[in-house]
Amino acid sequence: MDKKRLGNSDLEITPIGFGAWAIGGGDWAFAWGPQDDNDSIAAIHKALDLGVNWIDTAAVYGLGHSEEVVAAALKTTSHKPYVFTKCGLVWDEKKEVLNDLKQIRREVEDSLRRLQVETIDLYQMHWPKPDEDIEEAWGVMADLKKEGKVRWIGVSNFSVSQMEHAMKIAPITSNQPPFSMLNRAVADEILPFCAKNNIGTISYAPMHSGLLTGAMTKERVAKFPEDDFRRRAKNYQEPLLSRNLAVADFIGGIGKRHGVSAGVVAIAWVLHHSAVTGAIVGGRNAKQIEGTIPAADFRLPEEDFQEIQRYLAEHVA
C-alpha cells in the first residue's frame, strides 16, 4: 500500500486504517449492537495481514472495551501498527457519557493500561466540548507529548476557529472530522485549512456508518438490535433512508465498472480529496475487512468522480 505522512508527524500511514468503534460492543449509548470479541480480533488481524498499518480507537468506545480488544489483538500478531486513541468523553457509574476535558491525565493513564502500550502514537481530543476548556486541555495534551506518554497530538470534530485557538498553544498533528458523500460539511473550510497548515486529516465514517456499503437495506435497518445507535440516527430514518440507499445503488453501479463494491467507491471518493491523509474504515469481522480492503489501492477515475459530484448536487443537499 502507498503511504502518506500525517501532518507534521513522522507517521507514514496507509490510505485506510482500522476503525474500532463498533468492536467496543453494546451496552452504551452509541453502540452498534452486540459484538463478538473473537470476530473483532479476527477483523484486526485480517486488516493488519493485508497491509493496514494503523488502528483508530477511543476510550469511550464500549466504555473502554474497544481499547482492551485492540490490546488483545496486538498481543497475538507480529504486526506493529500505529495505535491512535482519543480522550475527552468520560462516563459515570450509570454508563452515561459526558463531555469532560479536565480528566485527560487520568484518561491517558487508563488508555495506556487498557491498550498495554508504553506510548500512544496519536492522542486525539475527541470533541471540542466544553469550548471554554479547550485551550487548557490542549496545554495538557502538549505536556503529555513532552513527557513521552504520547508521540503526537491531534483533534477531532474541531472547527477552524477552534483549531486556530489550539495552534497558539501547540501544533496540531491531525484533525479527525466526519466526511462522506452524505456529510460534506468539512469540504469548504475545514479541509482547506488543514491542508494549508500542514494538519493531517483522517476522516471518519466514509461509508456513513454502513449506509454506503451497498449491503444495507430497509429490511436490515428494521432488524437492527435495540442497542444499535443507528436505529435513532437521522440518516437511517425516512425520507433520508430511501435517498441514501439510492446513493449507494448509484455508486454501486460505478463500482461494477471497476469490479469493486459501493463501499470501496465511497471510500475512494473521500480519499480523492487531496487534504485527506487517510480514511477510517470499520470492520466487525474478517469478511467485512476483505470487502473494503480494495479501497487501499483503488483510485477513483476523474470522470467517475465528476459523475458522482453531479449526482450529489442533484440529489443530496
Image: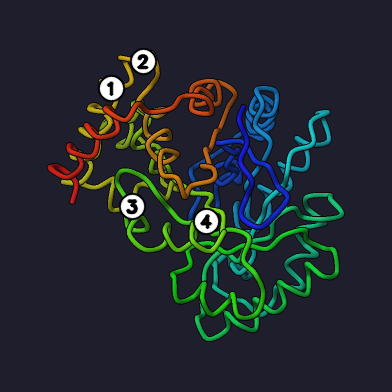
Q: Which residue is mark 4?
A: 176
Residue extending furthest toward the front? 196
Determine the CA span between mark 1 and mark 4: 27 Å
Mark 4 residue type: Gln
Q: Is residue 53 above or below residue 298?
A: below
Label 2, residues with CA under 10 Å away: few <14, some 14-19, many ≥20:
few
Determine the CA span between mark 2 and mark 4: 29 Å
Q: Is residue 269 above or below residue 92?
A: above
Mark 3 residue type: Ala
Comparing 288 with 4, the one in front is 4
State left or right for residue 101 relative to residue 243.
Answer: right
**Residue at 23% in and 42% down:** 241
Disc nearer the start of the sequence (3/2): 3
Determine the CA span between mark 3 and mark 1: 27 Å
Mark 2 residue type: His
Mark 1 residue type: Ile
- Secondary structure of the residue carrying numbered label 4: strand
Residue 125: where, in percent of width, then height?
A: 60, 66
- Secondary structure of the residue carrying numbered label 2: helix
- For the residues labelled 1 and 4, say whether their Cβ atoms are less than 8 Å apart: no
Disc nearer the start of the sequence (4/3): 4
Residue 173: where, in percent of width, then height?
A: 63, 60
- For the residues labelled 1 and 2, say whether their Cβ atoms are less than 8 Å apart: yes
Q: Which residue is mark 3?
A: 233
Q: Is residue 31 above or below residue 251?
A: below
Quadrant containing the N terminus in the rendered view: top right
Q: Quadrant of residue 207?
A: top left
Q: Which residue is mark 2?
A: 258
- Secondary structure of the residue carrying numbered label 1: helix
Comparing 27 with 87, the one in front is 87
Label 4, residues with CA under 10 Å away: few <14, some 14-19, many ≥20:
many
**Residue at 40% in and 37% down:** 210
